[in-house]
Image (cartoon, rainbow, N blue to C red):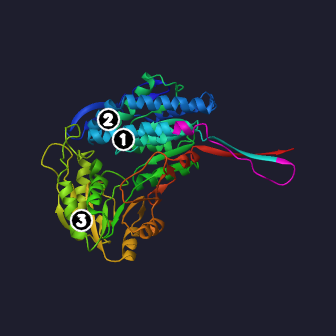
């Protein structure tokens, strides 16, 4: 772990085995931090904040350091991607794309670091009134296992750009890429002052809770499931600590009869079978007009048949292993329960008969809106297909879920496309493309999909505090 400027073991020397989920092999051991380690981390982070070496640095200079971090991330992308693939199970191709996206995110926020501005406000009388935006303070980043490095950088970049100090806690299953990235930043001598970035490893329940409930932490950022988000929010509420929560999803691709089905089928497969479906923004529901239902389902099944499944580092593999056999078994169990409520498996539906946490890409048709396959986030490679006949029915089906992260609309009718984009209850909508995001666009969820905004200039609002100054002239 990187705590107080040193690479160290846990206070009591305890370690955890880190696996390659494609083989079950132990590939590393990492420290299991204690509460004492959390205290050291927070003290060092607060000292770095109060020293003002980072918070009061010329914002343009902070931006230059973030640019160097981006360059170092690009330079180390292939080795980081190989580590990510081995630890998470995803394909090397996906991992490389994600880490380069992380570098792009650093570049984007590097350009914003000197554009965090207050405003002057007209008030009555002979007065000057203005606002300052100042760093939020010490921020704790609780990182998920599905995109371990990309999603870490997604929140670390704006926090650093705003002048905050950062404590990053990777998921206990997948800590290796974040540790290696932090080491690469040190080795590349990017100019980040000591203790501005720290990495602590260990149990999410113990270390994540301790960070979320710590009075010395000024903001908490979590990407994870709804129960985890609720637990973190409850702990943070003890100190009224603000949170950004990016939680679950049950995204729908809503396909009308005038859509380009060939293009659509490829995007549907990408949106649910990439990363073995372990994505909050996965398009796990397909809501398709009855006139093109059979044709589109056939096209999806044909497309996914071209996706070889295997270890992520093998040449030609399109879908890697899931992150852990226990998670795969949970997904298969939920699939079984859903099928008891209805639906027909037209492809997949099983674990692969081989070593590792592999599962077949699965498509289930005839899924009703009250089926758990329609309502609940399985977080695996399972596509639930539902027919509709009228536009109003499609909209009602799309909105009939507790989640609201990303939905896709497939039509060549411009009026319909914009009407659905307005009326679909989700923080993000993509028309004739899925899934898609950029560092400069807001990544945000409605309903149980979260609180707050990741990415875009709006993300900086969380990492700054507004101060109003009034001057009697």
Residue 352 magenta-highlighted:
no
Q: Residue at x 38, y 45 (%)?
A: 144
Q: Is residue 431 above or below residue 246?
A: below
Image x and y of residue 125, in percent: 87, 52
To which residue does mark 1 refer? 98
Which of these two is toward me, 188 or 194?
A: 188
Q: Which residues are magenta?
A: 109-127
Q: Which mark is residue 296?
A: 3
Q: Which mark is residue 330?
A: none
CB of mark 1 within 8 Å of CB of mark 2? yes
* Mark 3 crowd level (few <14, some 14–19, many ≥20, 10 Å Cα): many
Instruction: Identify the main secondary structure in magenta.
Output: loop
To which residue does mark 2 refer? 81
Quarter of image, res 263: bottom left
Q: Secondary structure at mark 3?
A: helix
* Mark 2 crowd level (few <14, some 14–19, many ≥20, 10 Å Cα): many
Image x and y of residue 462, in percent: 57, 47
| Label located before the other in sequence (3 or 2) | 2
Is residue 83 left or right of 207 when viewed as pictured?
A: left
Count of all numbered marks drawn on residues in the image: 3
Q: Is residue 107 above or below residue 276?
A: above
Give the mark toward the camera: 3 or 1: 3
Q: Is residue 423 above or below residue 139?
A: below
Image x and y of residue 306, in percent: 18, 51
Residue 339 visible (yes or no):
no
In the image as oriented, which residue stretches furthest toward the left? 353
């Amino acid at each position: 772990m990187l705590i107080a400027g040193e690479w160290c073991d846990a206070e009591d020397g305890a370690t955890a085995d880190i696996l390659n989920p494609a083989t079950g092999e132990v590939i590393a051991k990492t420290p299991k931090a204690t509460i004492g380690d959390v205290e050291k981390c927070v003290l060092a982070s607060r000292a770095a904040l109060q020293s003002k070496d980072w918070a009061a640095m010329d914002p343009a200079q902070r931006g230059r350091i973030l640019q160097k971090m981006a360059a170092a991330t690009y330079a180390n992308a292939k080795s980081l991607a190989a580590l990510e693939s081995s630890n998470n199970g995803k394909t090397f191709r996906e991992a490389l794309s994600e880490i380069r996206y992380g570098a792009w995110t650093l570049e984007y926020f590097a350009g914003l670091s000197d554009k965090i501005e207050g405003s002057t406000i007209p008030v009555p009388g002979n007065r000057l009134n203005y606002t300052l935006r100042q760093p939020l303070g010490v921020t704790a980043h609780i990182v998920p296992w599905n995109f371990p490095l990309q999603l870490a950088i997604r929140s670390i970049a704006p926090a650093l750009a705003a002048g905050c100090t950062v404590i990053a806690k990777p998921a206990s299953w997948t800590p290796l890429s974040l540790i290696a990235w932090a080491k690469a930043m040190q080795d590349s001598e990017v100019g980040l002052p000591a203790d501005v970035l720290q990495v602590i490893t260990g149990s999410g329940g113990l270390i994540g809770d301790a960070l979320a409930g710590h009075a010395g932490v000024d903001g908490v950022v979590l990407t994870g499931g709804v129960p985890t988000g609720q637990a973190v929010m409850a702990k943070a509420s003890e100190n009224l600590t603000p949170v950004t929560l990016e939680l679950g999803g049950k995204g729908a691709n809503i396909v009308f009869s005038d859509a380009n089905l060939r293009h659509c089928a490829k995007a549907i497969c990408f949106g649910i079978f990439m990363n073995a479906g372990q994505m909050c923004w996965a398009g796990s529901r397909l809501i398709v007009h009855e006139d093109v239902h059979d044709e589109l389902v056939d096209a999806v099944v044909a497309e996914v048949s071209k996706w070889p499944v295997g270890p992520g580092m093998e040449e030609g593999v399109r879908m890697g292993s899931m992150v852990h056999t226990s998670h795969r078994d949970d997904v298969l169990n939920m699939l079984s329960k859903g099928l008891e409520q209805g639906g027909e498996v037209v492809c997949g539906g099983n674990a692969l008969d081989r070593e590792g946490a592999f599962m077949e890409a699965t498509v289930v048709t005839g899924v009703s809106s009250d089926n758990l396959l329609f309502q609940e986030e399985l977080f695996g490679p399972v596509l639930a297909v539902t027919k509709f006949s009228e536009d109003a029915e499609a909209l009602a089906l799309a909105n009939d879920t507790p989640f609201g992260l990303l939905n896709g609309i497939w039509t060549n009718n411009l009026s319909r496309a914009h009407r659905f984009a307005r009326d679909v209850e989700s923080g993000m909508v993509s028309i004739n493309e899925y899934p898609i995001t950029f560092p400069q666009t807001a990544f945000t969820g409605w309903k149980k999909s979260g609180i707050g905004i990741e990415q875009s200039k709006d993300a900086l609002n969380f990492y700054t505090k507004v101060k109003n100054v009034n001057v009697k002239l």
